[in-house]
Image: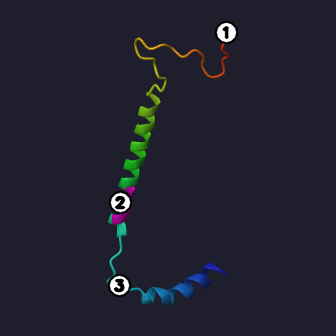
């Protein structure tokens, strides 16, 4: 199917569209684009902050350290 044939078939559909129908338009696109940029910036900031987090748990004062860690064998 050629592009001209597709366009000629869509012309009658365009006449059926209501000219008074409300559509999002340019303002809707701008609002959506701003929200998308805000989410992207928040995700970028979150990744940066999560990279600074230290996940290694340190033993509390007075608590004994575990006898063996993962992958080590206890020798008795």
Q: Residues within 10 Å of mark 3 (few under 14, many from 20)?
A: few
Identify the secondary structure beneath mark 1.
loop
**In the rendered view, would you say 21 is above or below 37?**
below
Q: Nearer the viewer, residue 64 or 69?
A: 64
- Distance (Cα) linking label 1 and label 3: 86 Å
Rendered image quadrant of residue 23: bottom left
The image position of residue 2, as x and y in percent, is 65, 80
Tell me, yes or no, whether the two marked residues, 2 and 1, touch with CB atoms within 8 Å: no
- Residue 52 is one of the magenta-drawn residues: no
Q: What stretch is highlighted in magenta?
A: 28-33
Q: Which of 70 and 2 is in front in this view?
A: 70
Q: Earlier in the sequence, mark 1 or mark 3?
A: 3
Q: In the image, which is nearer the foreground, mark 2 or mark 1?
A: 1
Which numbered circle lies on residue 19? 3
Quarter of the figure that contains the N terminus: bottom right
The image position of residue 53, as x and y in percent, is 44, 28
Q: Main secondary structure of the magenta part?
A: helix
**In the rendered view, would you say 4 is above or below 71?**
below
> In the image as oriented, which residue stretches furthest toward the top?
76
Q: Nearer the viewer, residue 1 or 45?
A: 45
Instruction: Please name the residue shown 35% across and 70% down the image.
Output: 24
**Is residue 61 left or right of 9 when viewed as pictured?**
left
Q: Earlier in the sequence, mark 2 or mark 1?
A: 2
Residue on which disc 1 sits: 76
Residue on which disc 2 sits: 30
Instruction: Please name the residue shown 66% across and 14% down the image.
Output: 74
Rendered image quadrant of residue 63: top left
Rendered image quadrant of residue 31: bottom left
Q: How crowded is mark 2: few (under 14 residues within 10 Å), some or many (20 or more)?
A: few
Quarter of the figure that contains the C terminus: top right
- Distance (Cα) linking label 2 and label 3: 22 Å
């Amino acid at each position: 199917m050629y592009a001209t044939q597709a366009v000629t078939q869509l012309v009658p559909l365009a006449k059926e569209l209501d000219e008074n129908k409300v559509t999002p338009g340019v303002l809707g696109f701008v609002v959506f684009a701003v929200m998308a940029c805000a989410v992207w910036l928040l995700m970028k900031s979150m990744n940066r902050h999560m990279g600074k987090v230290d996940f290694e748990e340190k033993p509390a004062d007075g608590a004994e350290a575990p006898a063996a860690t993962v992958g080590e064998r206890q020798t008795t």
